[in-house]
């Protein structure tokens, strides 16, 4: 603050002093509030940094009052411009990668680094509570630590940190790094970041998720392997551009599958034309070929043509593209449906903070989980803001296949841990993936070599009409009252090889505090080929020469609950 505030002989002097900005040029903003009541979380506005004259004029009226009955906190230092739960920016990811790479012992080590993921190291829950109490909406000063003289007002929040999973391709080692990201401001230029390594740990005998770069390299290696080329010629395929090779993690069936080696057992499929990108290649699985690939060195280490099974016959109706391209006709009896909100949506957004009806929460996103919902709360009348959940997400999805025949018994896909639901998210399109007034959110990820990729519009937020909430008609008077229900939906969709998953979190308007998680499974089955006249006990024949092995999808949700929890209390984990 300015000098007049520093000299003020008030019992809040200590609190005021610790709010003082740092060196010249440090970024901060003035946040004006008339009230900090829980149901008035929207009556705030952020202005640009004031001049010294403006600060001098306002110094007397904007001094934080640290008395126990304080009704407002008006000057907020912004030494940290991001909420502790905000997604890592592209700049922060780049700084984290450069910091880790610079810490490599030798040029060889640095060149061998492959970056699996760079994510926000989520802070302790008390840090989140502190941020919400004083630095960011919904502004809850009651959550501040208190002394006999009033609340303790911090000068700034702890620096943000990133957690990096790094694979050393040369040594086949996986390491976890923690990097502190300090926001730096200078008078001659805008803010930037610098990083500092806090810790690095090598995790023995594990393999991190595979990357799309590795998938492409594996496909190329297999398709160039002479014995594989000969095996495909036996099946009538000379053009390797028609062949699809999908690497699958080996799982663990014996010591030969030890996680000390980075291995993949690909599944093979074949299109009917090499220049037909709209064709469903998964409708023609290649059965009987066993391939094992060393993904570290990108070489085929095992190959065997175990059994000849003819390729399933060509059938354009198995394609999933437009009707004419597959020999059929699209339906013409479905008319356009438009969702109009002429006055705009009922939700309010600031960065990743969402307010809708009585709900408020923050949106996050990780390469593994995809959508994460943070700090869910409900405004419950006179009871104010009631915490509901600290964190909601889907952390894993596993598909075990029940056919004991090779190779299907080995198909046990962990789509979050082995591939990443978030890394495989779509850029959503209005009118198809979401309807109505849409707010989209982007996400930034590191790629395999340490660059930054952005998935635009990967999270969709919109309102949906949900039918009648309640209705009653008085049979004596004939008068009726009816109310429609509405829900807020936050969603993303991802593709992992042949399968699509749509993840939806619904927040309902009714006063029962209802939150619903929904997963929509779509995409294409992982199929097997049959000999003429053959059938399988543990699968369903769906077309001549084609069957679907029995399988199940298990979704694992992590729900870190905080129902009516106060600061410092234990959270209820489900």
Image (cartoon, rainbow, N blue to C red):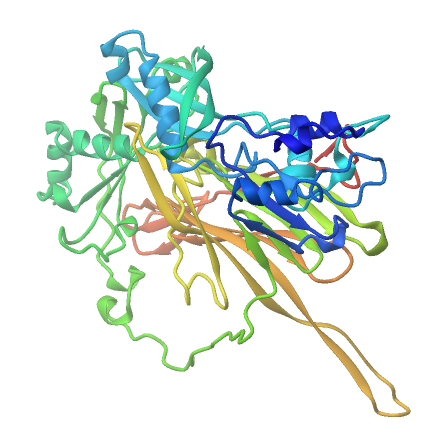
How many numbered marks appear? 0
Rendered image quadrant of residue 573? top right
Which residue lies most toward the bottom here?
Answer: 477
Q: Position of residue 507 (x, y in %)?
A: 65, 56
Q: Position of residue 376 (x, y in %)?
A: 67, 45
Q: Work out whether residue 495 can be spotted.
A: yes
Residue at image location 71% in from the left, 41% down from the top: 60
Rendered image quadrant of residue 315? bottom left
**In what quadrant of the picture does the C terminus appear?**
top right
Q: Is residue 506 above or below residue 48?
A: below
- Pick the residue in front: 354 or 397: 354
Drawn side of residue 223 relative to residue 111, left or right: left
- Pick the residue in front: 315 or 297: 297
Drawn side of residue 532 relative to residue 391, left or right: left
Which residue lies most toward the right here?
Answer: 476
Q: Is residue 459 above or below residue 407?
A: below
- Pick the residue in front: 279 or 458: 458
Q: Work out whether residue 136 can be spotted.
A: no
Residue at image location 17% in from the left, 29% down from the top: 221
Q: Is residue 241 above or below residue 183?
A: below
**In what quadrant of the picture does the N terminus appear?**
top right
Residue at image location 81% in from the left, 28% down from the top: 11
Q: Position of residue 466 (x, y in %)?
A: 64, 68
Q: Position of residue 443 (x, y in %)?
A: 42, 43
Which residue lies most toward the top here?
Answer: 105
């Amino acid at each position: 603050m300015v000098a007049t505030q520093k000299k003020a002989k008030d019992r809040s002097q200590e609190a005021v002093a610790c709010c003082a900005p740092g060196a010249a040029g440090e970024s901060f903003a003035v946040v004006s509030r008339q009230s900090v009541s829980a149901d008035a979380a929207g009556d705030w506005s952020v202005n640009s940094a004031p001049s010294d004259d403006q600060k001098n004029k306002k110094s007397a009226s904007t001094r934080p009052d640290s008395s126990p009955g304080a009704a407002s906190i008006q000057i907020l230092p912004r030494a940290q411009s991001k909420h502790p739960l905000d997604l890592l920016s592209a700049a922060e990811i780049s700084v984290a990668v450069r910091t880790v790479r610079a810490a490599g012992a030798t040029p060889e080590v640095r060149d061998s680094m492959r970056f699996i993921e760079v994510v926000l190291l989520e802070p302790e829950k008390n840090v989140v509570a502190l941020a919400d109490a004083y630095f960011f909406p919904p502004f809850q000063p009651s959550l501040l630590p208190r002394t006999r003289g009033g609340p303790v007002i911090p000068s700034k929040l702890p620096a943000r940190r990133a957690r990096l999973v790094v694979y050393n391709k040369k040594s086949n080692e996986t390491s976890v790094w923690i990097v502190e990201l300090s926001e730096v401001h200078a008078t001659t230029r805008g803010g930037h970041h610098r990083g500092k390594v806090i810790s690095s740990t090598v995790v023995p005998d594990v393999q991190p998720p595979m990357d799309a770069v590795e998938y492409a390299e594996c496909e190329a290696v297999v398709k160039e392997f002479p014995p594989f080329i000969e095996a495909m010629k036996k099946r009538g395929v000379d053009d390797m551009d028609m062949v699809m090779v999908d690497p699958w993690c080996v799982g663990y069936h014996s010591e030969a599958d030890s996680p000390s080696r980075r291995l993949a057992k690909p599944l093979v499929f074949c299109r009917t034309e090499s220049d037909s990108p709209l064709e469903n290649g998964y409708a023609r699985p290649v059965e009987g070929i066993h391939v094992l690939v060393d993904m570290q060195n990108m070489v085929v280490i095992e190959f065997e043509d175990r059994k000849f099974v003819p390729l399933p016959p060509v059938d354009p109706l198995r394609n999933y593209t437009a009707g004419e391209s597959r020999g059929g006709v699209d339906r013409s009896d479905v008319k356009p449906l438009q969702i109009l909100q002429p006055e705009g949506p009922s939700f309010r957004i600031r960065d990743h903070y969402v307010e809708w009806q009585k709900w408020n929460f923050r949106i996050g996103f990780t390469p593994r989980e995809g959508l994460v919902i943070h700090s869910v709360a409900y405004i419950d009348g006179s009871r104010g803001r009631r915490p509901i959940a600290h964190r909601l997400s889907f952390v894993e999805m596993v598909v075990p296949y029940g056919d004991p025949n090779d190779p299907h018994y080995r198909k046990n896909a962990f789509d979050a841990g082995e591939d990443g639901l978030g890394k495989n998210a779509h850029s959503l399109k209005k009118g198809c993936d979401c309807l109505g007034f849409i707010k989209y959110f982007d996400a930034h990820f590191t790629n395999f070599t340490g660059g930054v990729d952005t998935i635009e519009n990967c999270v969709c937020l919109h309102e949906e009409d949900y039918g009648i909430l309640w209705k009653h008609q008085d049979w004596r008077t004939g008068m009726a009252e009816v109310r429609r229900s509405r829900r807020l939906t936050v969603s993303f969709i991802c593709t992992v090889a042949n399968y699509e998953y749509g993840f939806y979190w619904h927040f309902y308007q009714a006063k029962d505090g209802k939150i619903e998680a929904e997963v929509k499974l779509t995409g294409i089955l992982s199929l097997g080929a049959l000999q003429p006249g053959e059938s399988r006990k543990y699968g369903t024949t769906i077309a001549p020469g084609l069957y679907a092995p029995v399988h199940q999808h298990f979704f694992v949700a992590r729900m870190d609950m905080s129902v009516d929890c106060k600061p410092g209390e234990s959270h209820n984990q489900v």
